[in-house]
Amino acid sequence: MMRAFFRVAWIVVKKDLTIEVRSLEILSTTIFFAVTVVLMFSFGLVVDGRPLNDVAAAILWVAIAFSGTLALGRTFERERHNDTLRALLLAPADRPALYVGKLAGILLLLALVELVLVPLVGLLFAAPIFVHGFHLVALLAGGTIGFTAVGTLFAAMLVRARSRDVLLPIMLYPMTVPVMIAGVRGTAALFQPTPDLAVAQFWIGLLGFFDVVFVTLALWTFDPVMTD
Amino acid sequence: MRLRSLLLCGCLIAMPIAATAAQPPPSGDFVPVDETLPGEQIPALPLIATAYGFIWVVLLGYVWTIGRRLQKVESELAALESRGK
Amino acid sequence: MTRSTLVMLALAAGMFALAPWMINAAPNEATMGLVYKIYFFHMPSAWMFMVAAIASGIASARFLFLKRPSADGWALAAGELAVLFGAFTLVTGPLWARKAWGVWWVWDARLTSSLMLFMIFVAYLLLRKYGGPGSDKLGAGMALFGMANVPFIYVSVNYWRTFHPLTSVVPTLPVEMGIPLWYCVTAFTLLFIVLLRMRARLEHQRARVEALYLLEDES
């Protein structure tokens, strides 16, 4: 049972990766978009050549949220194109496994984006990204999983809806406010001149809890929501 | 009709706000004593009037639109049902 | 409209008409003076806002998991009322704060979380209006997530900032202030029930009209 579940999820991931590797369309555009977002914010938030307090963490997370939305939209747009999502849903497979597969694919994509984004922010804003690397990775992982868990469900639901491009961010951003606050405050605590590990750990804990609740809830709702 | 009622609602909401904004700031040499008591620089009444006025206007408007829409749907329903028989 | 709805509507209207006298009779508060009287409409609005959000979440869950078609009408009605009472809360709050705190808005925990919950339900209504076919299910999913999100928003925002008078104010209120307050809470609850029933009825009748048209097309 469990093995079949993960096999289906793995097949979905493999399918998405094969398509993506061929063109690298979503990966390259998303990375470049994230870099652009960082630069746009820098022009607004750097005064007299010096960034304002805590700006690095805020820019990092806003860039993740924006590029995450873009990646979610593009990934499901691809499924919509030839109505392949319907075919996937018709396949004799566990629906939640399809969700997990999609989630894992987008997480992998965003991890690659963050691999470029985090060093860039560290470089431009002199943020100490390696000092407490483990905590930073935990924050990034917890935040990205939380954001994508809700985002994958909503993007999948919206595939057949009208005006989905604008509805996805409208629905997703208010819903992921806890993730954004936790990510920004936790990362800001790490980027301080004297990092505050207790604060960072509190936010990592909250993110972990958020991830568990929302992934469970999404697994539970994916089936009834995607049924015609 | 709808535009006009919207405009009317807008005016009703805007009036108390304008009244609040139009209050001259306590300034210069001639300041009555009872107005400079700490915490009383901003008159409270326009704020309260705006708060209650807003709720009243929006509520009445909302009840009115629901009532109208309900009437329309129910007359349509009655027409359909009598046609079906 | 059913007879009971009309009776309740008349009762709620009567209570609202009397409310200004009740509130006027309450004494002024020591530090905030006259302006605290916004409280008598502000707090019941905030409560009804919460109740509407929870009702919408529960109705959505019933629609999604128990497949009750009529639950969708209730969910939409409650969602709309959440936006209505949320707007009351978010408009009266700053008017009070302007006087009591000197600014229109502070990034306090409760203010921020109320604003976020309000945003979630505005998004819900936008989705229901512009989502096209199938948006009832999408909306149900969203309302469900919105409800589950409330504690997280609250905890995260709480650790981020805090300013607002605590919930413990209510039981410690003196009697002269307590009576008008509970009067207003009753009026708002009654109003909430009436509006919910009217709005849900509108939705249910619409569904019936649509079903009848479909039936006509087939025959």
Image (cartoon, coloured by chain):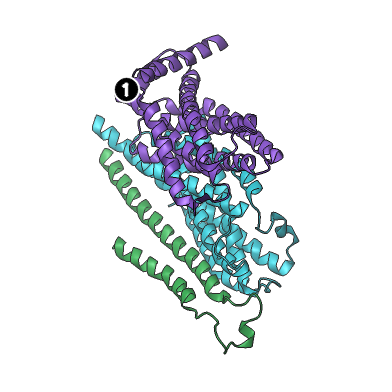
Chain colours: A purple, B green, C cyan
Determine the residue located farthest toward the bottom in the rendered image.
B30
Residue linked to disc 1: A83
At mark 1, the secondary structure is loop
Q: Is residue A67 above or below residue C119?
A: above
Residue nearer the viewer, A129 or B32: A129
**Label 1 is placed on what type of residue?**
Asp
- Neighbor class of circle 1 (other Cα within 10 Å; few <14, some 14-19, many 20+) is few
Instruction: Name the spot of residue C104 as percent of width and height, x first.
Output: 54, 64
Relative placement, left or right, of A165 versus C143 is left
Residue nearer the viewer, A152 or A70: A70
Q: Is residue C84 above or below residue C133?
A: below
What chain does mark 1 sit on?
A
Residue that appears at 58% across and 47% down: A54
Instruction: Name the spot of residue A99 as percent of width and height, x first.
Output: 48, 23
Instruction: Name the spot of residue C74 as percent of width and height, x first.
Output: 48, 43
Quadrant, the C terminus of chain A:
top left
Q: Quadrant of residue B47?
A: bottom right
Relative placement, left or right, of A77 versus B62 is left
Residue nearer the viewer, C170 or A67: A67
Q: Is residue B4 above or below residue B75?
A: below
| Total labels drawn | 1
Residue A213 in sight in this render: no
Quadrant, the N terminus of chain A:
top right
Residue nearer the viewer, A214 or C59: A214
Residue that appears at 36% across and 37% down: A164
